[in-house]
Structures are given as C-alpha cells and as structure tokens.
Amino acid sequence: MSFKVPRGTQDILPGQSEKWQLIEEKIRELCHLYRYKEIRTPMFEATELFQRGVGDTTDIVQKEMYTFEDRGGRSLTLRPEGTASAVRAYVEHKMFGQPDQPVKLSYMGPMFRYERQQAGRYRQFVQFGVEAIGSADPAIDAEVIALVMDIYSTVGLKDIKLVLNSLGDKETRDAHRQALIEHFQPSIGEFCSDCQSRLEKNPLRILDCKVDREHPLMASAPALPDYLTADSAAYFAKVKMYLDALGIAYEIDPNLVRGLDYYNHTTFEIMSTAAGFGAITTLCGGGRYNGLVEDIGGPDMPGIGFALSIERLLLALEAEGVELDVKDELDVFVVALDDEAKVKAAELISSFRAKGISADMDYIDRKMKAQMKAADRLGAKFVLVLGETELAEAAANVKTMATGDQQKVAFHDLVNYLSRINRL
C-alpha cells in the first residue's frame, strides 16, 4: 500500500521550508516593531464559537468547517480562521481588564477549510493575523493596515493594491439591508440557492456571491456608502486621513463586503496586480468588528484585525519573480578517512556547533572523493580532512572552498580560527 498527502494539503520540503522560515521571521520582526504580541490558541474549538463568531450565514460555517464529535459528545471544529479564537481567549482571560488598551495580538498557524483546492488555496493552510481589541480610534485601523502593507513590501512585493470600504454602524447596516431586500426580492428566484437563503438572513452577503456576480441586479444594487450615517462617514473619513498621512495609497470599492458576518465600519482587502497571478487576486482581508467581543460573551469592546495566507503570499512572490534571500550555508564539512578520525570529527563538530558554527560530516562511509563532492554540493565554506597524519599532529588543514587556499590549524585553535575567518 502506498500513501499520499491528503487532498487539499501539501508537504513543505527542505529547500522550500527555508522560504517559509524567512517570511515568518520577517513577520515576527515587524510585529515586534508594531508591538503586536503573539497568542497561540488551540487548533480546535467548540463549534458554537465559530457559528456565533464567524456567522451561521457564511460559507465557512455552512459548507467549509471540519466538525466532529469527541468521545464526550461535544461538537468541536478545527479552526477555520483565527479571529474568533483570539477573541474567545481575550474574553476568557479577561484581557479587557489590562491597563494598556488596546490589546494587540498576533498569531500564525494552520487553519482548516473544506473547499476546492486552487492555486495557493488549500484545505489546511497557514494564516497570519493580528487583532487590536479595545480601541475605537480610526488611527488603529490605519496602523493595522500599515502593518500588513509593511509585511508585503518587506518581503519584496510591489504589484499590490489596497481596497477600502466602510460597512458603517448598525443604523447604516439596517437601512442598507432593507434596501437590498427590496432590490433583490422581485427577482430572487433567478439567483442561486445560497443567495435565496441569504435574502432575509444577511442580504449583504449576496453581493459577495461568486455564482451570480454577473447578474444585472448586482451592478445596480444599492451602494452601502449612500446609507452611511454622519458618524460612520466621519469615522471613515478619519481612517482615510490617517492613511493619507502615512502615504498609503488605496482605492474605494463600495461593493467590498468581505465574507464574514462580524465586520462593520472599515473593511479592506489587499490584492495582487501581478500579471498571471490568477482570477482570485485577494492576498489579505480584514476589518473592524465592533460587537464581536460582546457576541462571544465579553464586554462591549471594539476591535479590528486582518488575516493573510502565507501560501498566497508565496504565490504572489512567484508571480512577480521575487527571489527570497534565503541563506542556508554550511560553514564546515569534516572529511574523516577512518573510524578513529570519525570519532575526532564528531568531537570537533560538537565544539563548532557549540560556538554557532554550522558543521556536518559523512555518515554513510563514503570514500574521500565522494565526501569532498558532498561538501561541494552542500555549499560548505570550509573543509577539514582528518586522517592518520592529522590525528598524530593534532592539527588539520582548513581548506577554503571558494579559493582553494589551505591553512594548517591546531585542533585546539580551530574554533577561534573558523570564527575569525568566517567573519571576514
């Protein structure tokens, strides 16, 4: 019997995993600069958390969740996104009581959605996200957007654009909701079954439908900005003012609604504009979710956040032809010619590694020529050859692979010598 990776998942092999590590490192460095602290939540939660937090009218809840019953009869779900879990932790651990608000959190890890596999989209995917909970200041909206724009620019992406919209407050949403119902109701039979069920529950989600996107009523649907209250319009104006001050370019799209029920006020997406990237251009999405903390059992605390897919970030880099500066150099390869030399090689390698010098040796008893070829394939900067003579003299020739130069160095001075020459 042969086994293969489950459909919708992937193995990230050596050679590729280093790219992931570099991206993750850059993201964590930016989170430190912006003061977003990491939170790690379980990979599964109570199913009701996502039903209430994400919204039971969303495709995620209705079609895409991996839900199972444990031995205690509890319904659990592999997390399909990170916000609900972060907010649950915020409420459970009473982080709203901390003196410094907003609480700024970041997370990175696997999420799970049962959907058709496409380029850069998997059933298990890695998501990075942030949440800023406890502030209704439009300046924090701009900061969250600035962070994700910094992430993309730091890794080298250039062909991206930021798209903004405002979903307004409850009064705005209620007025727009009624207008949408009246607009779609006479012809709702022409729409897909999902849209028909959304008409009364959440008609805004009709605008996000992928099946009926070309229906004429979509283009003529009531535009949400026309229903913004004075307060909502003023809030959105301030968000744009801060983005202007930060030099962040954006486009306004009144049809940008996002796919989750908890959004209100500021919503945004970042899209790839690279040629040949594909039909689905969204790299990142986010927005404000005032009311979600209260829905999950906490106090009435506002929040905003975003999430991005690492897989799609890598796909965008590939589309733009950006090569990541991945450094995976081997400092020293030790060639041992007999069993006694192998023991000394193991001892020396241990002392090298203890001082931060990467080192390796042969473990399958190859001849000297084959070991030298292995050192070359691995990109070793230096090679030491240990044999009977070297053991007797307690010294080894250090060969610099780039130039072919050799220097005899006593065993006891190898660490200092390699540390010094490695810095040159």
Image: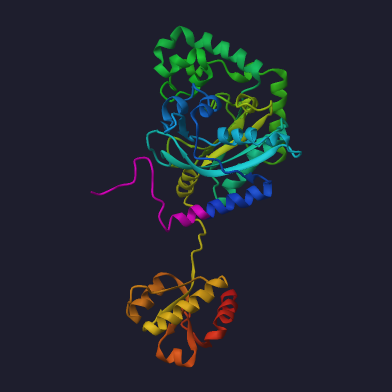
Q: Is residue 377 above or below residue 21?
A: below
What segment carries the magenta color?
1-21
Report whether residue 269 is seen.
no
Residue at the outermost left position = 1
Quadrant containing the C terminus is: bottom right
- Percent position (x, y) of residue 206? 48, 19
Q: Is residue 326 left or right of residue 420?
A: left
Residue 353 picture location, percent across and down: 53, 71
Taking depth in this image into account, of 271 and 58 the one nearest to the observer is 58
Q: Is residue 138 magenta?
A: no
Residue at figure coordinates x 33%, y 73% from the top left: 364
Task: State how many labels appear.
Answer: 0
Please give left or right for residue 12 compared with residue 81 in the image.
left
Residue that protrudes farthest toward the front in the picture:
72
Identify which residue, 34 or 97, lies in the foreground.
97
**Which quarter of the figure has residue 337?**
bottom left
Report if residue 14 lies within the magenta region.
yes
